Image (cartoon, rainbow, N blue to C red):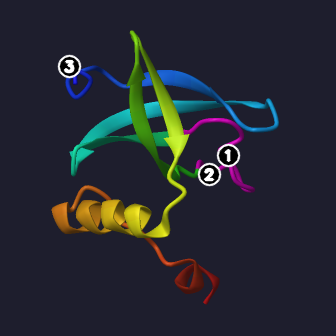
């Protein structure tokens, strides 16, 4: 990959299947098993009630097509879990269980 790992965080826009545009900040790129993954923070509407900001990390496949990079949702649960396990093992991300937040 051409220096994507060394680039500064960037604001990117993605379009979902309904044609809606979403803004993200690309915070890191992970290379695992011959596949690149982008770690993104969702920027649209990230303020919670009470004014606190919530940063949720989104993991997407990163593909290079010609000179452009595209992001794709990880559809395979096994692949997604493999990436999450790697990130947890490397200590790059801390994940909170939703059930723990409700208690």
Secondary element at image label 1: loop
Tag 2 residue: 52
Residue 34: x and y, percent?
22, 44
Judged from this view, the residue extending furthest toward the bottom is 103
If you read the primary sequence from the N terminus, does the residue marked by circle 2 or circle 1 appear first?
A: 1
Tag 3 residue: 3
Secondary element at image label 3: loop
Asked if the residues shown at circle 2 and circle 1 are in contact, with their CB atoms under 8 angstroms apart, the answer is yes
Residue under the point 46% across and 40% down: 40
Tag 1 residue: 47
Secondary element at image label 2: loop
Residue 61: x and y, percent?
43, 42
If you read the primary sequence from the N terminus, does the residue marked by circle 3 or circle 1 appear first?
A: 3
Q: CA distance from mark 3 to mark 1?
A: 32 Å
Q: Is residue 47 left or right of residue 89?
A: right
* Res 1 → quadrant: top left
Q: Which residues are magenta?
A: 42-53
Q: Is residue 21 left or right of residue 98?
A: right
Q: Nearer the viewer, mark 3 or mark 1?
A: 3
Residue 37: x and y, percent?
36, 43
Asked whether residue 50 is drawn in magenta, I would say yes
């Amino acid at each position: 990959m051409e220096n994507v790992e060394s680039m500064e965080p960037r604001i990117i826009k993605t379009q979902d299947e309904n044609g809606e545009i979403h803004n993200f900040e690309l915070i890191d790129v992970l290379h695992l098993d011959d596949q690149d993954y982008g770690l993104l923070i969702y920027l649209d509407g990230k303020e919670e009630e009470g004014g606190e900001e919530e940063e949720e990390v989104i993991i997407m496949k990163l593909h290079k097509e010609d000179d452009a990079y595209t992001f794709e949702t990880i559809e395979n649960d096994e692949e997604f879990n493999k990436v999450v396990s790697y990130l947890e093992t490397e200590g790059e991300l801390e994940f909170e269980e939703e059930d723990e937040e409700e208690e």
